[in-house]
Amino acid sequence: MNLVLSPDLRHIIHAHVEGTYPNEGGGFLVGTLSGDQRVVTEVHPVQNVFASEEQFHRFLAEDGTFQRIEDEADTRGLTLVGYFHSHPNSPAVPSEFDRVHAWPHFAYLIVSVQNSHAVETRLWELVDDRSRFNEANLTIKE
Amino acid sequence: MASIKIPTPLRAYTGGQSEVQVSGAHVGEVLNDLTTQFPELRQHLFSDDKLRDFVNVFIGEEDIRFLDGLDTEVGASDKLRIIPSIAGG
C-alpha cells in the first residue's frame, strides 16, 4: 500500500492529536484509490468516545461517523481509505488492541505524540489473515 | 432479494462491489449466503462462528443486537449494512 498525504492535511491531523493529548485522538481519511495507491484529499477528525478514563490509551470513533463519512465519500465518487489515531507517549507502532480491531485494505496512520507534539507518523496495513500489520509507504507531498 | 452494503475495507473481497444481493430468512442465513459468495469475508466477520464484537450489522437503521441478533428476520426487500467499529489503542 502507498498513501500520499499533503503537508497541509498532515498538519490538520497533527493539530488534532496534539489537541487531544494526553488522550488519544483520531479520525478518518477520505480520498482516491487506484490499485495500491491511495491519495488523501480530506481528513475528518472525530470524537473519541471510549470511556474517558481509558482514553489515554484507547480510541473509539463516535457512533454513526463511519457510515456518514463512508456514505458521503461514496456519493461523491471518493473512497474512505483509512483512519488515523494517536499514541500518546508511545511509538507510532500498532498495539495488539489495534491488530484485533483492525480491518484489512484500510490505511492505518498512527501518530506518536510526546509532550503535546506529534513526533512521528507511520503507516500500517493489516495483512489478509489478520495475523500482523506490515508497515506501508507514506509519502508526504502536495 | 435483500441487499447488504459492504464497508469500504472489505470491498477488496467482493470484487469492489459496495452492495451485494443476498438471500436468507434470518440475518444469520444472509451472512452465511454472503460468506458463501465471498468466502474471504468470513474471517473478518466471524470468530468461532460468532459475529466479532466490533462488527455491527444493521437492518435499515436498527442494530440487530437490539433486535434478535442473528435470528432477526429479513424481508425480501430489506437493506442490511455491515458497519465496523473503528477503534485503536
Image: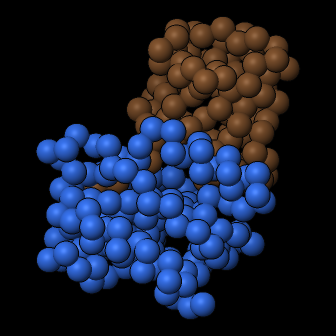
A129 lies above or below B20: below
Q: Is residue B30 left or right of residue A119?
A: right
Quarter placement of the N terminus of chain B: top right
Image colour assigned to chain B: brown
Q: Position of residue B24 (x, y in %)?
A: 74, 15
Closest to the observer, B84 or A136: B84
Closest to the observer, A21 or A2: A21
Q: Is residue B22 left or right of residue B66?
A: right
Quarter placement of the C terminus of chain B: bottom left
Q: Quadrant of residue A22?
A: bottom left
B65 lies above or below A119: above
Q: Position of residue A83 (x, y in %)?
A: 48, 61
Residue visible at 27% across and 67% down?
Answer: A19
Residue visible at 79% across and 47% down?
Answer: B17
Q: Quadrant of residue A84?
A: bottom left
A88 lies above or below A100: below
Q: Residue furthest right?
A: B1
Q: Position of residue A14 (x, y in %)?
A: 36, 76
Closest to the observer, B51 or A57: A57
Q: How is the image coloured?
A: by chain
Residue visible at 59% across and 45% down?
Answer: A68
Q: Position of residue B69 (x, y in %)?
A: 52, 15
Tell me if I can see residue A40 in this picture: yes
Numbered circles on residues, count:
0
Q: Is residue B71 left or right of residue A72?
A: left
Tell me if I can see residue A87 in this picture: no
Residue visible at 65% across and 32% down?
Answer: B81
State the blue chain. Answer: A
Q: Is residue A18 left or right of residue B76?
A: left
Q: Quadrant of residue B54?
A: top left
Closest to the observer, B27 or A85: A85
